[in-house]
Image: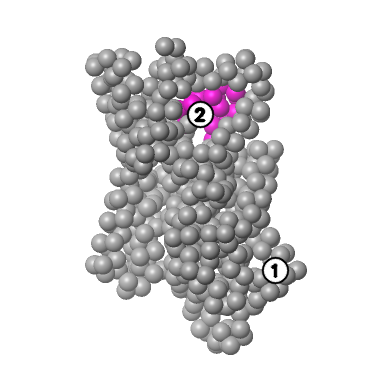
Amino acid sequence: MSYEAIAIFMFISMMLMLLTGQRVFAAIGIVASVAALLLWGETGGVEMPFNAAFKLFNWYPLLTLPLFIYMGYILSESGIADDLYGMFHVWFGGLKGGLAVGTILLMVVISAMNGLSVAGMAIGATIALPEMLKRNYDKIMITGVVQAGSSLGILVPPSVVLVLYGMIARQPVSQLWLAGAIPGLMMATLFIIYIVVRCHFQPHLGPTVDKRDLEMPMREKLKLLRAGITPFLIFFFMTGLFVMGITSLVESSAVGATAATIAALVRRRLNRKVMEETIRKTLAISCMFMWVILAALGFGAVFDGIGAARAIETLFITNWDLTPWEVLIMMQLSYLVMGMFLDDTAMLVIVAPLYVPLVKILGFDPIWYGVLYTITCQIAYMTPPFGYNLFLMRAMAPPEITLMDIYRSIIPFVMVMTLALVLVMVFPQIAMWLPEYVRSR
């Protein structure tokens, strides 16, 4: 059997395993292990996962993963994230669509605190969505707002997905985070522009909050502003020290986790129940990601060993006579298709062993491609019929929001995200300016 046939057989086997409902790390790890044993026997086949494990545990930035996840959960479980919505409610409620704009800003902050889209979705669906429904916002529009805003969690630093990409692609996570910052803020800005413009022409979609809800003394408003500003201070304190070169990447994550704990303690919300929930969820998510990374490294080692990347390069460029940009577009389209069935982690570990070496061969910057991958994942998350975020929203949304409402809600936001993707592809400096600037300093 040729190496090309082996690569295709491995890919199909893994997809079939995933369709049976197996956990991602199990499906990938089993296929990689069996292939390694069949190709290189007991000696080589056993050494490959062993070496992959040591690669994983010797990678120092791995420490950032549990620390950032912990930071996000301590802020969420202690209720500090809830204070943000209270602040946005008061300060943006007088603008048409103001609560929707505030929700997008809330999602940006939640993303900066956690790095996972699930956290933003949970907070948006349980806090923001009921508040906006209560104030007669259009249910279809605000459902799209929560889904689109929560997707920023995998692009805005500290993105856990970019950490995983950095581990698998062997790229510096600090550069990936810097590359994702401006595109993430640009996308949030595009969402806000869309909401403001649409509510201007269709005021019934996002009415202003009743004046009675906003009639409070300025002293109380400033007090609420101070309460909501805590997460902003944590984020800017953490990232500011990193950008100035005072702390390393791992030290910045420790600063964020420590600052979040101190904030919860000062607010008198750090009790045993909060700590138990935070530690339990942090441990569960961190262990899941480590198993997935370990399986992906083993799978990547097998693919690299059989020369799959070179085979795909020959197929696309030599046999099909595609240009590098045409190959890149095909790769992005494949993510959109897979996103209908898989989450971002599964997509990354399935195709990264193939795509990342191919990106380098084609002459593209792997840091820039990491941002393209992440934006495409955001779009795939919201693509019917099986987008990951669609079903998360269905599980968390109130009964009056139907699945068809959820499908209809994401259409304009997917168009905005596609525009952002095209802009980053056509103008790579949107992503690359900040990392190049920090690197030059």
> Is there any visible trace of residue 54 in the rendered image?
yes
Q: Earlier in the sequence, mark 1 or mark 2?
A: 1
How crowded pointer 2 is (Cα within 10 Å; few <14, some 14-19, many 20+) is rated as many
> Is there any visible trace of residue 87 in the rendered image?
no
Q: Residue at x 62, y 14 (%)?
A: 318
Q: Residue at x 33, y 15 (%)?
A: 39
Camera-nearest residue between 257 and 70: 70
Query: Magenta region: which residues?
Result: 352-369
Q: Residue at x 44, y 52 (%)?
A: 116
The vertical placement of 416 against 360, above or below, is below
> Is 8 on the left or on the right of 337, as rendered?
left
- The residue sitting at the right extreme is 201
**Callout 1: SS:** helix
The residue pinned by badge 1 equals 199
Q: Position of residue 160 (x, y in %)?
A: 43, 46
Q: Position of residue 156 (x, y in %)?
A: 52, 51
Q: Position of residue 157 (x, y in %)?
A: 49, 49
**Callout 2: SS:** helix
Camera-nearest residue between 3 and 427: 3
